[in-house]
Image (spheres, grey):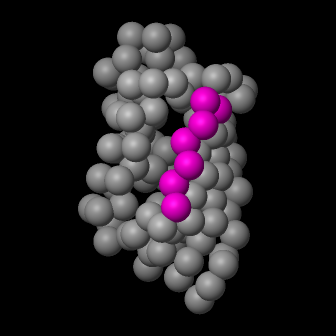
Amino acid sequence: MLYKFIFWTFRGLPLIKNTIALELEKILNSVFEETGSKAIELEITENSVSGLVATKLKPEKLLWLLKGRSSKLLREKFEELKRFEHLWCAGYKIDLIEE
């Protein structure tokens, strides 16, 4: 199935810059590969991540993995993110594009 998704940083803060954005892209791509999903589009801005993904997983499971893994690993690696208990806001938006 094909899904369009977006999720945001905690309070919409501009936290994703430069090397953080590069590391985030690596982490997200590793989750896609690990789950057999394919990122068709991926856009990372200072305060959001959006994309178009083909996956057989339930979309909420994929978003849980993307957000959870990236939050943990980025906060471990980058000193400026360690002060945040959560990197991402609680919600996300996901739409089914094609079955």
Tell me which residue sits at (44%, 79%) in the image: 56
In the rendered structure, does residue 56 fall within the stretch colored magenta? no
Tell me which residue sits at (55%, 42%) in the image: 44
Tell me which residue sits at (71%, 29%) in the image: 12
**Res 27 → quadrant:** top left
Instruction: Give the x, y percent position of residue 6.
Output: 65, 52
Instruction: Give the x, y percent position of residue 88.
Output: 59, 35
Q: Is residue 26 left or right of residue 17?
A: left
In this view of the protein, which residue sits in the foreground, 43 or 85?
A: 43
Is residue 60 visible in this depiction of the protein?
no
Position of 48 relative to 98 (above/below): above
In this view of the protein, which residue sits in the foreground, 88 or 46?
A: 46
Magenta segment boundaries in residue numbering = 41-47
Residue pushed farthest bottom? 99
Instruction: Give the x, y percent position of residue 26.
Output: 33, 44
Instruction: Give the x, y percent position of residue 82.
Output: 44, 14
In this view of the protein, which residue sits in the foreground, 10 or 52?
A: 52
**Res 10 → quadrant:** top right
